Image (cartoon, rainbow, N blue to C red):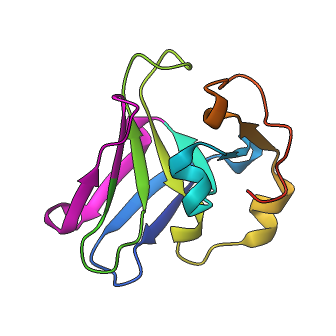
């Protein structure tokens, strides 16, 4: 069931609202970016994500993937979300919300949802990596 969540970075400069359906699952990736941050993400459509405040408090990192945009708070350094443009493996643009940035986060809700793993490190996005315990 889709529901509206609010979230923020650590210093509260960047705040967002997102409509999320945890029953559709969450994701973890072993690519060089996600793996180092140990990101736990949930994918939402751009129309289901609103940046409420802090756009001027964001700075951006652009890695090797030209369609993946990695904004983070320039004050506290927290990576709140990613924006993924086209073309990508899904066929549509999306936002990856860092679920650990959701205010009043219910860990059980996320743990009870299916988790998919992406092998971004091997550029094999459609298959899980052999090892996922560290993600």
**Count of numbered tags:** 0
- Residue 116 image point, x, y percent: 76, 40
Residue 1 appears in the picture as rendered: no
Image point (39%, 34%), residue name: 64
Q: Position of residue 25 (x, y in %)?
A: 74, 43
Q: Say left or right for 39 vs 73.
A: right
Left/right placement of residue 39 relative to residue 74 reads right
Task: Depth check: give the residue in front, 7 or 129.
Answer: 129
Classify residue 24 by image quadrant: top right
Nearest the viewer among 64 and 48 is 64
**60 versus 13 height, above or below:** above
Identify whether 23 is placed above or below 71.
above
Let me know if residue 31 appears in the view: yes
Q: Residue furthest left?
A: 56
Magenta stretch contains residue 66: yes
In this view, the residue farthest toward the bottom is 11
Residue depicted at x 55% and y 20%: 90
Question: Which residue shows up at 70% across the image and 50% down it?
Answer: 22
- Residue sitting at 23 percent across and 67 percent down? 53
For residue 89, what is the image quadrant?
Answer: top right
Front residue of this view, candidates 86 and 54: 86
**Magenta span contains residue 111:** no
Please state the horizontal and vertical placement of residue 66, each as a whole percent of the image: 33, 29
In the depicted structure, whether residue 44 falls above or below residue 74: above
Residue 76, position in %: x, y? 33, 80
Segment colored magenta: 45-70
- Image quarter (top left, top right, bottom left or bottom right) of the C terminus: bottom right
In this rendering, is residue 37 above or below 92? Answer: below
């Amino acid at each position: 069931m889709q529901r509206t969540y609010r979230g923020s970075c650590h210093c509260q400069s960047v705040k967002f609202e997102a409509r999320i359906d945890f029953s559709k699952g969450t994701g973890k990736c072993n690519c060089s970016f996600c793996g180092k941050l140990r990101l736990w993400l949930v994918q939402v459509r751009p129309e289901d994500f609103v940046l409420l405040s802090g756009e001027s408090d964001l700075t951006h990192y652009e890695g090797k993937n030209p369609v993946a945009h990695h904004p983070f708070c320039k004050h506290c350094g927290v990576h709140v979300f990613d924006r993924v443009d086209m073309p990508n493996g899904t066929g549509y643009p999306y936002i990856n919300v860092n679920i650990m940035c959701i205010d009043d986060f219910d860990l059980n809700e996320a743990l009870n949802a299916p988790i998919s793993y992406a092998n971004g490190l091997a550029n094999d996005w459609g298959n899980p990596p052999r090892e996922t315990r560290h993600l």
